[in-house]
Image: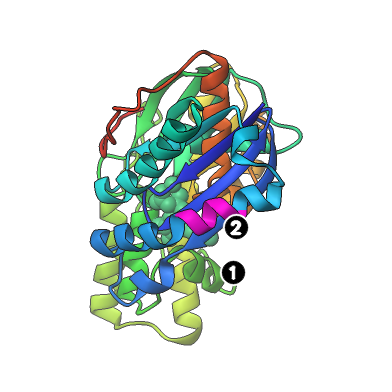
Amino acid sequence: MLCLGIETSCDETAASVVRDGRVALSDVVSTQVDIHRRWGGVVPELASRNHVAQVLPVIDEALGRAQVRLTQLDAIAVTTGPGLQGALLVGLQVAKAFCAATGLPLVGVNHLEGHLLAIRLTADAPEPPFLALVVSGGHTTLYAVDAFGVYRRLATTRDDAAGEAYDKVAKLLGLPYPGGQPIDELAQQGDPRAITFPRALKGQDVLDWSFSGLKTAVLQHVQSHGVPEGQARADLCASFQEAVADTLTRKAIAGAKREGGRALVLCGGVAANSRLRSLAVERGAEAGVQVFVPPKRLCTDNGAMIAVAGAEAYRRGVRSALTMDADATWRL
Ligand code: KG4
Ligand code: ZN
């Protein structure tokens, strides 16, 4: 079974051909971060225009690298939400046009389902039921994956997403957008105990997160001490990173125990974070919870994860109408 996956929900134009829902024959990602960086965040109109310019060459390259012709495919999967409406429409219209021209079935995919199932592109992926923590620029949510297509939200952030907190703190420190990786790199040279930042919603009975207080604490620290340089900057990054990784892992592992010790999968852009990855594995081992972390390139947005989710949905009989619309706020 060959499925083409197309992803244009935010600032990555991506396409991939996946075999049998498990093996990526190609995975092409064209990122727009250099375009958005000078604005300090994603500019929706610029994102749409760049998707228009990139989407066909990216799909061509994905088919070419996989050595698969359009007519050899079994289905075309495309992200139809959540995301930026104009950006989503670019991928969706192209997918519809290909399906109309070839007669191939169209499968609309939820971007978050793509993140949840990206782990299937690795050899030792857990089978459902498992738990998955989606941590990205727009989402911080713990899902129970009871079966393919059957998802329960167990916990979510009450304000900022974890990636959003990273990006805002990076801005405060004068670091480039997106801020996750630069903070991660500085944090690795800093002392995580240098500054004690707050851990919100600490109670054992609450699985939800809140990151706005942490962001404010960093702001107040910068207001009273100035923007730190050198070692002090690394220490601040390490202390902030520790607070984020601490609360994310504590609650995700608590959720896994509450659900009978199910395996826990980390996914989304923030799952590329070095401290989150190591602390999750460490705490998982202590708690008897198996933790799976996909390689970093499968954590950030890509077309392969959309093809995987699309192939799984196709197997369950899901087919989307050529009249379907994008849904910028689609909740999984
Ligand atoms: O999943 P993703 O590529 O796009 C969204 O769907 O949002 O996630 C992007 C987010 C950004 O906020 C970025 O700062 C964060 O992931 N990120 C990281 C790291 N790499 C990317 N956050 C912390 N540490 C990292 N190493
Ligand atoms: Zn994403």
Question: Which residue is denoted by mark 2 in the rendering?
Answer: 274
**Is residue 236 shown in magenta?**
no
Q: In this view, does 232 lie to the left or right of 227?
A: right
Query: Residue 321 location, x and y as percent?
Result: 35, 22
Residue 188 badge: 1
Query: Residue 4 location, x and y as percent?
Result: 56, 38
Observer-nearest residue: 328 or 124? 328
Residue drawn at (31%, 56%), measured in percent from left and top? 214
Amino acid beneath label 1? Gln
Query: Residue 267 location, x and y as percent?
Result: 53, 42
On the rendered image, what quadrant is the N terminus found in?
A: top right
Observer-nearest residue: 207 or 271? 271
**What secondary structure predominates along the stretch shown in magenta?**
helix
Specify few, some or many for label 2: CA neighbours under 10 Å numbering under 14, 14-19, or 20 or more. Answer: some
Q: Distance between the residues labelled 1 and 2?
A: 8 Å
The tag earlier along the polypeptide, 1 or 2, is: 1
Observer-nearest residue: 51 or 305? 51
Residue drawn at (24%, 61%), measured in percent from left and top? 45
Considering only vertical position in the picture, is 287 above or below 94?
above
Q: Quadrant of ligand 1?
A: bottom left
Residue farthest to the right?
Answer: 123
Considering only vertical position in the picture, is 96 above or below 36?
above
Q: What element carries label 1?
A: loop
Provide the residue span drawn in magenta. 56-61
Q: In this view, does 132 lie to the left or right of 212?
A: right
Mark 2 near ligand 1 (CB under 8 Å)? yes
Q: Is mark 2 on a helix, strand or loop?
A: helix
Specify few, some or many for label 1: CA neighbours under 10 Å numbering under 14, 14-19, or 20 or more. Answer: some
Question: Is label 1 in contact with label 2 (beta carbons under 8 Å)?
Answer: yes
**Is residue 59 shown in magenta?**
yes
Amino acid beneath label 2? Ser
